[in-house]
Image (cartoon, grey):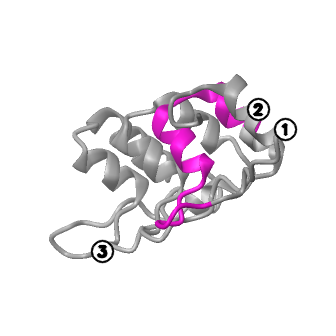
């Protein structure tokens, strides 16, 4: 339901005792799917349930990585306003890729550049994405 942006169905499933905190075999939660789908209404509803938007799956991807991959700038804008977003903006996945790197690899150059620029403005954000040639 989440992946297809069926909010009313997702609400019904949770009311029927489906576990909104459940994960698949890759450690993905409903948050990962909502971020991929780019549905802010679903993201806000999941946020109200208490799910952690910065929980990493088995690949080390957070909601930021997933939204960056699918060029979901509206979701990324919302995520970067959440408390502690600065700590996760440059968090690399298990292959060393930050959300900005993931966006660039997916061909989403505008979102990649925007994410990289945030590293200079969010308090506590580390330096920008690593340089692939040097590994830094």
Q: What element carries label 1?
A: helix
Residue hosting label 1: 15
Q: In which quarter of the image is the C terminus?
A: bottom left
Which numbered disc flags the more N-terminal residue, 1 or 3? 1
Instruction: State whether residue 120 appears in this view.
Output: no
Other-residue count near label 1 (Cα within 10 Å), few / some / many at <14 / 14–19 / ≥20? few
Q: What element carries label 2?
A: helix
Q: Does the magenta stretch include residue 121?
A: no
Marks 2 and 1, Cα distance to the nearest angstrom?
6 Å
Is residue 105 depicted above or below 14 in this figure? Answer: below
Q: Residue at x 50, y 46 (%)?
A: 118
Q: Residue at x 24, y 66 (%)?
A: 131
Residue hosting label 2: 11
Residue 30 in the image, given as x and y percentages of width and height: 61, 47
Instruction: State whether residue 129 appears in this view.
Output: yes
Which of discs 1 and 3 lies nearer the camera? The answer is: 1
Residue range of the region highlighted in magenta in the rendering: 23-45
Residue 56 in the image, given as x and y percentages of width and height: 55, 65
Q: Quadrant of the N terminus?
A: top right
Residue hosting label 3: 136
């Amino acid at each position: 339901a989440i992946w297809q942006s069926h909010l009313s169905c997702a609400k019904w499933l949770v009311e029927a005792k489906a576990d909104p905190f459940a994960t698949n075999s890759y450690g993905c939660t409903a948050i990962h799917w909502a971020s991929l789908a780019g549905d802010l209404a679903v993201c806000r509803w999941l946020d109200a349930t208490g799910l952690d938007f910065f929980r990493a799956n088995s690949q080390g991807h957070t909601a930021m990585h997933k939204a960056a991959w699918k060029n979901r700038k509206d979701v990324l804008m919302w995520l970067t306003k959440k408390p502690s977003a600065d700590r996760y903006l440059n968090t690399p996945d298990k292959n060393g890729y930050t959300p900005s790197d993931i966006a660039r690899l997916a061909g989403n150059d505008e979102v990649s550049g925007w994410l990289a620029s945030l590293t200079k403005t969010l308090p506590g954000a580390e330096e920008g994405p690593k340089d692939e040639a040097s590994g830094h």
